[in-house]
Image (cartoon, coloured by chain):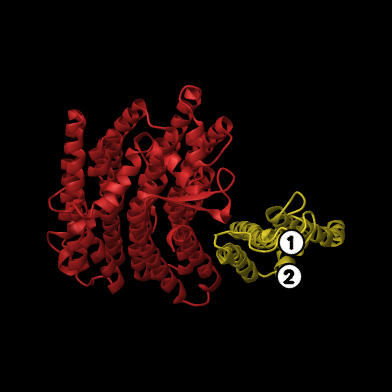
Chain colours: A yellow, B red
Amino acid sequence: MSKEHDRGMSVIVKTVTRLTVGLILLYGIYILSHGHVSPGGGFAGGVIIALSFIHLMLAYGKEAALKRIPSQALSFFEGFGAIMFLAIALLGFTGGYFFLNFLPKGEPFKLFSAGIIPLCNIAISLKVGAGLFAIFIALVLLKFEGENK
Amino acid sequence: MGANVIPLFVVVSLSGAFLISLFGRKLKWFPDLIGSAFTALLLLLSLYAVKIVAEAGTLVYSAGSWKPPVGIVFVLDGLSSFMLVTVNLVAFCVAMFSINYMAKYTSKWKFYTLFLLMLAGMNGVLITGDIFNLFVFLEIASVASYALVAFGTERHELEAAFKYAVMSTVGSLFILLGIVFLYSATSTLSMADIALSLSPGKHSGILMLVSILFLMGFGLKAALVPFHAWLPDAHPSAPAPISAMLSGVLIKSLGIYSLCRIIFCVLGVSSQLLSILMVLGTLSMLIGVFLAIGQWDLKRLLAYHSISQIGYVILGISLGTPLGIIGGLFHLFNHSIFKSLLFLNSGAIEYTTGTRDLKKMGGLSEKMPITSTTALTAAMSISGIPPFNGFWSKLLIIIACVQAAKYWYGFWAVLASILTLASFTKVMKYAFFGNLKSQWAMIKEVPVFMKLSMIILAVICVFGGLLFFPGLREPFLLKASGVLLDAKTYASTVIRLVQ
């Protein structure tokens, strides 16, 4: 059973995955980067980015996905996202308040606007995306360990 | 600096947690250093918070300079600063104890990450002035504590953690439901704003419903008696420093503090609610101690005593008289000191002998003089023997019962105290006195950091009673009890200060 999982699914699934996985990733980045001007944001974008990797893993098996993004990198991104969010909040002290939006706000509804909000979204997406994918990997590895017994 | 210190309580502990998760895997010395240094920093900050609250009164901080009801405010008043000192003092001693104790576990950095996350959650609950923010911090602390209970990943630890997770999530759901009803009635989440928009005539139905929901939710977090079933499993299963944290401060900051803050300052306290709390407190006091007295597992015995001592705190606070509230809060502080110490002692015994069964121990005072002396101090404190700190706070609660003409409640408090003494006589006899068993002939006293943290806590047990004497009680205890006594002014103070 586990060997079959390593090799992945049928050729139809693999082909469809190859065509769609880049689009899913791109869509995630779109949701993330437009979080401050349209529905969505760091959490939703991070989840979609993580889903693109999970999609890859389901179709091609866990080695293919882990080769692109190893678990050490995941753990690094998770910690880094949180530290980045905290650092942005702390930089607000330069304007006198914790979490102050200290950057210029720009023009509403433009991509480069809203001060620190896009940066916060990026930090959240790193944390959420890496965290969600790490949880998925943990569940998968646990399942394989259970099967081997 | 002034009010700028308030967000630092969350920032320092969160940054410690994430720095350890980034660098702790590679650098072996890093988690120990950050864990102890950051908790020491938090302790200093909380002492500073007591000082500025004593000088300047209540402080309010608007995160991101957004004013309530839109933004989230942090409020530092007497009760918050009192609880912050309690939590961070215990956290510092526990972090120091863990340097040696956690060496036997693999992946120490995960332990410190979760520990500091739990601390961030607790500190957040204490300083926030926004009811949904309180729920978020409460969940951070709770989720971190589920993982910490399961840290050993043995069979019974996982089982206890699962049970704890399910029960505690049910409690959280009650709290969330209460917040939803409050929000639907008042259209605001800021605690001060809710308190001002609620009027007893218009909202009496919803007030009753929400009070009951919060009583169930926070009562579950505080392990009051009908909701206590998870505690005797969860607290002993965690590693000893975490048991000390859970029993010492987690159930108090998530349970008692939040319950008092919301019921007294936001919903407005009624005499029916206080009498319900009084009955629940007395039941916890008696049932906890009766269940404890027959236990042979040392940590399980201590866990049942936590239920019993929480009963004292709730009884004192729910008397509603000035002396009762002072006594309850003082007992809260004292209990967090001596119960953490007792759990650290049980951890020291487990560290050297590898057992928690009282029947297998015996005569350990020969080989472990410091552990046995500090355990004796803590046992006398919890049993209420003068001049240790537990005596003074129990005395205050009993005098307050008599003053309020609740003679039966005073009688039950005395009875529970005598039974506590009986059960700790048993602990001391079986664990430390008597003849040394031959299998323990080769054991040694625990390493230096474990000794140091136990000695610090024991010294506070001996001199803790001094906190009630004039000069020391004004900035610490009287400020804290003043918040609950003048609970009606909380909302107007916060709104006035934020403008």
Q: Is residue B324 above or below residue B9?
A: above
Q: Is residue B289 above or below residue B408?
A: below
Q: Residue at x 34, y 40 (%)?
A: B484
Q: Is residue B272 above or below residue B351?
A: above
Residue corresponding to mark 2:
A68
Tell whether label 1 touches label 2 (CB within 8 Å): yes
Residue corresponding to mark 1:
A53
Quadrant including the C terminus of chain A? bottom right
Q: Nearer the viewer, residue A59 or B189?
A: B189
Q: Is residue B310 above or below residue B23?
A: above
Q: Position of residue B92 (x, y in %)?
A: 35, 64
Q: Is residue B485 left or right of residue A29?
A: left
Q: CA distance from mark 2 to mark 1?
A: 9 Å
Q: Is residue B110 left or right of residue B420?
A: right
Query: In which chain is the residue bearing label 2?
Result: A
Question: Is residue B297 in view from this perspective?
Answer: no
